[in-house]
Image (tube, rainbow, N blue to C red):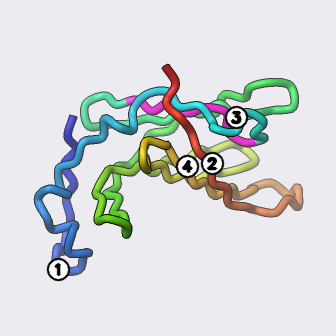
Amino acid sequence: MAQTLEFKQTGDLHPALADPATRTLNAGKLTGRWVNTEPLTQGVAEITIAQEGEHFSVRVVGVGADGPVNWPTAPARVMANLEEEAGQRAVALAATFDFDFMRVESYLRVNKGVLVIVAYYTFLDASGRSNYVNREFFYRAG
């Protein structure tokens, strides 16, 4: 399904964003179940991206000391993804996961068939842990 992107002030945008081909992009490359390319990850084991109409959701399974940890499913915001290399245009997603002790802001995109997630972890408790950023790579399962 194509996703339509709308902007308020076209003149302020990267010229490619005003191109009609960029305004309607196929998000099908993002949907499905993805598994981490690093089997020994201590972060995210798998990601499932679902689409219902024009709405997306992201479900994450993390790695925990006692086994898999199911994160709360998060709605995702659609973004245009402009690649500097070869002028590629695609759809990316932004999803925020809220926990009692932590917030994770994530950005997901497909690059050359691999799902890339960049996640910013912010601790909200008084644990003294350092906030951090992490990037992981996933292959399509099935």
Of badges 2 and 1, the one in the foreground is: 2
- In this picture, is 85 found above or below 103? below
Amino acid beneath label 2: Glu
Q: Pinpoint residue 83: horizontal percent, then vertical percent.
A: 36, 64
- Kindly state the secondary structure of the residue where label 4 is placed: strand
Q: Answer yes or no: do the residues labelled 2 and 4 have beta carbons within 8 Å? A: yes
Amino acid beneath label 4: Ile
Disc 1 marks which residue? 11
Amino acid beneath label 3: Gly
Residue found 71% across the figure and 50% down from its top: 102
Q: Main secondary structure of the magenta part?
A: strand
10 Å crowding of disc 3: few (<14), some (14-19), many (20+): some
Choose the circle earlier in sequence order: 4 or 3.
3
Choose the circle earlier in sequence order: 2 or 4.
4
Choose the circle earlier in sequence order: 2 or 3.
3
Disc 4 marks which residue? 117
Disc 3 marks which residue? 62
Choose the circle earlier in sequence order: 1 or 3.
1
Q: Answer yes or no: do the residues labelled 1 and 3 have beta carbons within 8 Å? A: no
Residue found 65% across the figure and 30% down from its top: 61
The region drawn magenta spans 43-50
- Kindly report the distance in space between the C-alpha atoms of the residues bearing marks 1 and 3: 41 Å
Amino acid beneath label 1: Gly
Q: Is residue 59 visible from the viewing direction of this image?
A: no
- Kindly report the distance in space between the C-alpha atoms of the residues bearing marks 4 and 3: 13 Å
Q: Answer yes or no: do the residues labelled 2 and 1 have beta carbons within 8 Å? A: no
Disc 2 marks which residue? 136
10 Å crowding of disc 4: few (<14), some (14-19), many (20+): many
Label at residue 75: none
Q: Residue 45 magenta-drawn?
A: yes
Q: Pinpoint residue 92: horizontal percent, then vertical percent.
A: 39, 51
